[in-house]
Image (cartoon, rainbow, N blue to C red):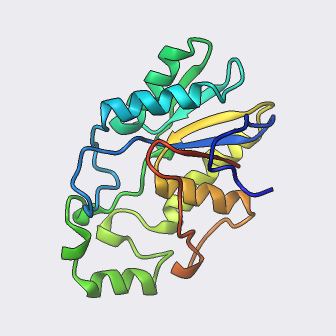
């Protein structure tokens, strides 16, 4: 069954609902992975209202520690006091190190080409590699899937892409072409 991106059905038992934070308050085209940005407040409330309707009673909500995810997680739990919030650092977005805050168009093409050539192992910006991201997301994924019921993650596009690979049985990525091209839009979700 393909992931539900439209968000019209509830998650079956043992599935993980992956929710991307609302639009961050940053100019389009900026590299901001681990940068702790706020999200649009109105969009956060709107997304929380939609997601709250999808969750079974007492669903654990695991959240990235970054403010854009914490805001959505807290809004969700305010609407649904039966939900339990757990902050998990493994759900933070990839850290692009020295490239954080740069416009993608201003990052030298040679740096992007080097990352593409060594996609799994190169620490783009000097902080974290895709393999390291995959390992930490994979540890969280395995823990979430070992429980008895559904879990909701409030997280980021890179984490959702990594989790979708884990759901398909792919535990590491060495070739950039194997990285999923799409993730849910801001404030959107999918079930895995």
Which residue sits at x=50%, y=36%? 88
Q: Quadrant of residue 11?
A: top right
Of residue 45 and residue 154, the one placed in the foreground of this image is 45
Quick check: can you spot residue 109? yes
Q: Is residue 26 above or below residue 78?
A: below
Q: Residue 28, percent across and down?
A: 26, 59
Residue 146, image quadrant: top right
Q: 37 or 119, which lies in front? A: 37
State the image coordinates of residue 186 (x, y, percent, origin top left): 43, 47
- The x and y percentages for residue 82 are 62, 13
In the picture provided, is 75 more to the left or to the right than 168?
A: left
Question: Disc count in the image?
Answer: 0
Q: Is residue 66 visible?
A: no
In the image, 4 versus 111, the foreground residue is 4
59 relative to 124 in the view: left or right: right
Could you tell me which quadrant the N terminus lies in?
A: bottom right
**Drawn side of residue 16 relative to residue 48, left or right:** right
Q: Residue at x 18, y 75 (%)?
A: 106
Question: Residue 154, relative to residue 34: is it above or below?
Answer: above
Q: Residue visible at 30% across and 68% down?
A: 126
Residue at point 57%, 38% (across, down): 153
Residue 2 x/y as whole percent: 75, 58
User: In the picture shown, does residue 104 fall above or below 51?
Assistant: below
Image-based side of 15 in relation to 85, left or right: right
């Amino acid at each position: 069954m393909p992931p539900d991106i439209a968000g019209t059905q509830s998650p079956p038992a043992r599935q993980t609902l992956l929710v991307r934070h609302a639009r961050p308050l940053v100019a389009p085209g900026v590299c901001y992975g681990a940068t702790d940005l706020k999200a649009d407040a109105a969009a956060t409330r709107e997304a929380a209202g939609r997601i709250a309707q999808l969750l079974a009673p007492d669903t654990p909500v695991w959240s990235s520690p970054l403010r854009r995810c914490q805001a959505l997680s807290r809004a969700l739990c305010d609407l649904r006091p039966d939900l339990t919030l757990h902050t998990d650092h493994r759900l933070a977005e990839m850290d692009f190190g020295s490239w954080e805050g740069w416009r993608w168009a201003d990052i030298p093409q040679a740096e992007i080409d080097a990352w593409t050539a060594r996609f799994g192992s190169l620490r783009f910006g000097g902080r974290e590699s895709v393999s390291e991201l995959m390992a930490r997301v994979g540890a969280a994924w395995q823990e979430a899937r070992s429980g008895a019921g559904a879990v909701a993650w409030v997280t980021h596009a890179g984490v959702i892409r990594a989790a979708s690979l884990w759901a398909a049985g792919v535990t590491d990525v060495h070739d950039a072409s194997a990285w999923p091209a799409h993730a849910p839009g801001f404030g959107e979700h999918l079930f895995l």
